[in-house]
Image: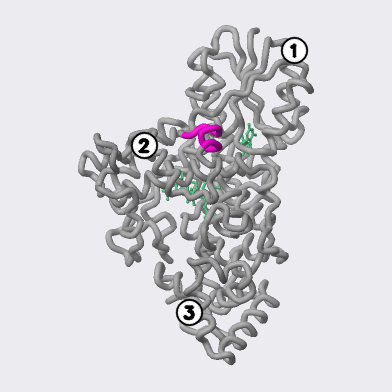
Amino acid sequence: MANLILILGDQLTRDISALDNADRNQDLVVIAEVHDEASYTNHHKKKIVLLFSAMRHFAQQLRDEGWQVHYQSYHPDNEHQNLEAVVAEQVQQLNPAKVITTECGEWRLHEQISQWHERLGVPVEIRSDARFIATKKEFTDWAEGRKQLRMEFFYREMRRKTGLLMTSDGGPEGGRWNFDADNRKKWTGKPPAPATFRVEPDSITREVIELVDEHFADYFGTSEDFHFAVTADDAQAALAHFIDFALPCFGDFQDAISDNEDWLFHSILSPYINCGLLEPIAVCEAAAQAWYDGRAPINAVEGFVRQILGWREFVRGIYWLNMPGYAKENRLGNTRALPGFYWTGNTKMRCMHKAIDATRRNAYAHHIQRLMVTGNFALLTGIKPEEICDWYLAVYADAYDWVELPNVLGMVMHADGGYLGSKPYAASGKYIQRQSNHCANCHYNVNKSTEQDACPFNALYWHFIHRHRDNFVNNPRMGMMYRNWEKQKPEQRDALLHRAEDLLAHIECL
Ligand code: FAD
Ligand code: DLZ
C-alpha cells in the first residue's frame, strides 16, 4: 500500500484535498465513526445521524468508484474509540509510506493530528482545506497591521477575489456592496414561507437513527422526523429548492422571526456546506446566477452571498488567527451558569421557548434566533462564555468549533472585547417585538419594564448597559444608549435595576 488517506466526518467531498493525486488502486481511504468525536460535546441526535449517515453514504460512493475504504462503524465496545487509534492500527498493519489528511476544522483535533507523525512513527502530510475561499495565510496577511478587523472590508476582498457579483469594470453589481438596509422587514405571513425540503430516510439512515437512539439516548434533541440530505446529490437538490422557493424573499425577511414558522426563507444549507456535501463557492455561484437570470432580486442574492463569502470566511479567519487563546476570552467577566431551560425549553419567555424548542426538534434555528433571542439573553444575563459556547456547539447540526466559537464568543457575547464586532448586539424586548409576532402570545408583557409581568429582556437590557458602563460608554455606537439611560428619572433607573436583579436571582424560574 502507498498512502493512508484519512477523511473526517466534515470532509465528505470527492474534491477534498486529501484525495488530490491519490491512487485508488494503491491507497487506502480511512473513515471512522468514533466515540471521542461523537462525545466531545452533547451533540444533537440529528447531528450525529446526519454525519454518520453521510459518512456511510460517502464511503459507499468511494467504494462504488473503485476505492479501497476501511470504514469503522460506531459501536460503544469498539476497540478503537478515537481517530488516532483507528489510524494507528492501519499504519501498523499496512505500513503506508505516509498518512495524508486535510487540515481539520477544530483546534482540539488539529493539535492531536499535528503530533501524529511522532506518535505513529510515519510521515503525516496535512493539506490545506481548499473548500474555503481564503487560505489561512491570506486572512493573516489581510489582518496584519489592521487596528480593527471588520467583516465588511474582508468581504469586499472576497468579492474581488472570486469576481462574484462584480461588474466587468470591477465594481459591485447593483451599484452597492451591501444591501443590508433593505433586509429588515417583519414577516406577517405573506408571502407564505416555502415548504421544507425533505429527504425520506433510506435504509442506511434508518439504521443510523436506530443506532443513535440506542447509544446516544441521553444526548440533546430528538432524531424524530429526520429529513436532512445525507448525500451530495440530495444536498444539491436542497440548494435548488432554496434558490427556487426561498431565495427571492431571503433578503426581505432575513432578520424576521416567526411564532409559526421554524425555517422562514433561510437556506438550511449550513449543515451540508460544513460537512462537505456542498461547496460554498458553488452555492454562492448558484445564487448569483439566479440574480443574473432575473429569478431573485439583488438585495436577496447579495445578502445571501455576503453570509457565505463574508461572514463564514471571516469567522474562520478569526478562529485560526487567534486560537487557542480565543476560546478562553471573557472580557466582560461573566460568571453566571447557563440556565437549565436552554436544554429543556421550559421557560415562559415565548421567544426563548420557541427558539429552544425548534432547536431541540430540528437541530436548527435561524441566525436571528441564535443572535437576538438565545444569544441576546445570554449576553444580557452574563452567562459564562465557556458554557454558552458549549451549548451552541452541541445543539446545531452545523456546529463546529471554527464557526461556532467566533459567532458565540465574539459576535454574541462580546467576550473578545470587540475584536470581531464593533458593538454588542444587546437588545430589549422591543427588538423582538419589532421583528416577530412572539410577544402577542407571551406570558410577559413587552410594553412593561419593571412590573412582575414585564418582559425580562427590558430590565435586563438596561442592567447590561448600566453594569458595563466602563466597557461601552466611550464606544461611539453605544453613545445613544447611554444618553437614553441617563435621561431616565433616577427612580425609574432604580426600579429597572431592582427588577433586573430580581430576574437574575430567579433566572431558572423565568
Ligand atoms: P442562511 O441564513 O440561509 O445563510 C446562508 C449561509 O451563510 C449559511 O448556510 C452559512 O453557511 C452562512 N452563514 C450565515 N451567517 C453566518 C455566520 N455568522 N457565520 C458563518 N456562516 C454564516 N453557523 C454555522 O455554520 N455553524 C455554527 O455553529 C453557527 N453557530 C452560530 C452561533 C450563533 C450564536 C450565531 C449568531 C450564528 C451562528 N452561525 C453558525 C451562523 C448562522 O446562524 C448559521 O450559519 C445559519 O443560521 C445557518 O442556517 P442557514 O443555512 O439557513 O443560513
Ligand atoms: C461531529 C463529528 C461526529 C459526531 N462524529 C465524527 C466521527 O465519528 N468521525 C469523524 O471523523 N468525525 C466526526 N465528527 C466531525 C469531527 O468532529 C470534525 O471532523 C472535527 O471536529 C474537525 O472539524
Residue 93 is labelled as 1
Asked whether residue 34 is drawn in magenta, I would say no
Instruction: Please identify, in this view, whether the residue under mark 2 or under mark 3 is nearer the observer.
Output: 2
Q: Is residue 299 visible?
A: yes
**Residue 166 percent location from the top left of the image:** 29, 38
10 Å neighbourhood of mark 1: few (<14), some, or many (≥20)? few
Look at the image and tell me in which quarter the N terminus lies. Answer: top right
Q: Which residue is mark 3?
A: 446
Q: Quadrant of ligand 2?
A: top right
Q: Quadrant of residue 144?
A: top right
User: At 70% across and 63% down in the image, what residue appears?
Assistant: 333
Q: Main secondary structure of the magenta part?
A: helix
In the picture shown, does residue 451 fall above or below 426?
A: below
| Separation (CA) of disc 2 from disc 3 | 44 Å
Residue 160 is labelled as 2
User: At 42% across and 63% down in the image, what residue appears?
Assistant: 257
In the picture shown, does residue 320 fall above or below 404?
A: above
Front residue of this view, candidates 234 and 145:
145
In the picture shown, does residue 489 fall above or below 362?
A: below
Q: Amino acid at mark 1?
A: Gln
Q: Judging from the image, what secondary structure is the residue with disc 2 in?
A: helix
Residue 396 is labelled as none
Q: Earlier in the sequence, mark 1 or mark 3?
A: 1
Q: Amino acid at mark 3?
A: Val
The residues colored magenta run 134-141
Mark 2 vs ligand 1: CB below 8 Å: no
- Most extreme residue toward the left is 294
Q: How many marks?
A: 3
**Residue 360 percent location from the top left of the image:** 56, 56
Q: Amino acid at mark 2?
A: Arg
